[in-house]
Amino acid sequence: MKYRSVFDIIGPVMIGPSSSHTAGAARIGLVARQLFRDQPEKVSFHLYGSFAKTYQGHGTDVALIGGILGFDTSDPRLTNAVEEAQKNELAFEFIIENEVSHHPNTVKIVMEKNGRSMSLMGISIGGGKVEIKELNGFELNLSGNHPAILVVHEDKYGAIASVAAVLAGKKINIGHMEVSRKEEGKDALMVIEVDQNVEQETLEEISALDHITQVTKVHE
Amino acid sequence: MFKTAEELVQKAEREGIKISEVMIRQEMKVHDRSREDIYNQMERNLDVMERAVNRGITESVRSVSGLTGGDGKKLHEYMMLNDTLSGNLTMDAVAKAMSTNEVNAAMGTICATPTAGAAGVVPGTLFAVKEKLNPTRDEMIRYLFVSGAFGFITANNASISGAAGGCQAEVGSATGMAAAAIVEMAGGTPRQSSQAMAMALKNMLGLVCDPVAGLVEVPCVKRNAFGASHALVAADLALAGIESRIPCDEVIDAMYRIGENMPTALKETGDGGLAATPTGNRYKQEIFGAGK
């Protein structure tokens, strides 16, 4: 079931005009910023489907920029996100893609700073709810509604168990987990949605494990 | 978690509780939260709705494009001075639904129910029915849990996105949700709520999403207005004991399949329907210039 809470239906409280094209877009932008763990210097938004057709009318452009700047769906600064971007030295561009995507409201976000880059594909499924479908080429399913940790690791036995053991030791319950890899034996990605906040110390403990390359935290 | 309207109604009947109570208990259980915590969050949503309704009927809000604004206030003034043909409760719901959507179009703060484009129907009916039934604050919060319960089923079995299912998935869903909630507030049974949802949604089937210039304004604001009047009629039908021949879950399923068959031009792309009329195109050019 895609929707798990009554507040997915009655909510979010948001700045208009569209839950999918404004609130959902802002949320995708916000998750992107959290995953990048910094404000990028430059961001490209590739828009597909309904996003590509109506992004100006619905404020999708403004909302995506606002999300990258760290604004929530109800933040009044969203409406002035373009000016805020200039103030915060964030360069942005919008690219209209004609390719048909799986979901009508799809955006691919590419962020860059100091030679570091990250790309992710997000969809806005309605009512402000979003899913992240791809991260740096890895397929995944991340709602952004729960705290989650993303672990890039070598595709080797024991890697998953050792991460799960650290979480169990901290009494952190795993609500949802997915593992994906681009190629057998190479890089793989664990997406772990948890019920409570994960402390920095726990993240460091996971980073120190064998076969773990990178650990990132996403929260609400 | 309940998956269908039938499961929801049966659970309420079996345990002798209201639909709102089933939704509250599920929320507590699935998300491990206290009743108070959930209630408080819903009350904050109610406060946002109330502010948007009041803003729209007292201020002449205007959207950035200038396409919408001021009609909620105009209608509210008209019904205060005149004995309206369709009845003051209905016109009050319509005025308050329009107000909310005008505030939304003006990039004001609203609560999505289930979406921003359809945010007028649930609060519009709630704050109109309130004048007649004089509910407690608690009962008003429960109204939102009933709406949420039916929206939850619709979202999981069909869609609440105009881009995925057309306006039937947005204003259609909101209208069904409101109808079910009015029934509970008026003292109807859980099954009558489900009947109201079925009858309201049936008459919204096939409604396309064709926003002029891609803006959540035309025809969205007025579709919310008519959705609110629809919800009241459906609630009265259900309270009179009238039943939908097609069960609620099958109506939701029909809505999903119609959405799948709907051409992309009519699903929030701004390419078809009213958006593609000469006047619709003219507005688009005036707002975005000839280049768009």
Image (cartoon, coloured by chain):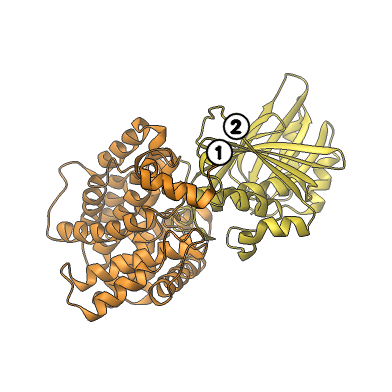
Q: In this rendering, is residue B270 above or below B232? A: above
Residue placed at 71% from the left, 23% from the top? Answer: A182
User: In this view of the protein, can residue A31 be seen by the observer?
Assistant: yes
User: The chain coloured orange carries which letter?
Assistant: B
Q: Residue furthest bottom?
A: B81
Q: Which residue is mark 1?
A: A52
Nearer to the camera, B260 or B178: B260
Spatial CA span between label 1 and label 2:
7 Å
- Sequence-wise first label, 1 or 2: 1
Nearer to the camera, B137 or A87: A87
Q: In this rendering, is residue B212 above or below A107? A: below
- Tint applied to chain A in the drawing: yellow
> CB of mark 1 within 8 Å of CB of mark 2?
yes
Name the subunit of mark 1: A
Q: Amino acid at mark 1?
A: Ala
**Looking at the image, how many numbered discs can be counted on the residues?**
2
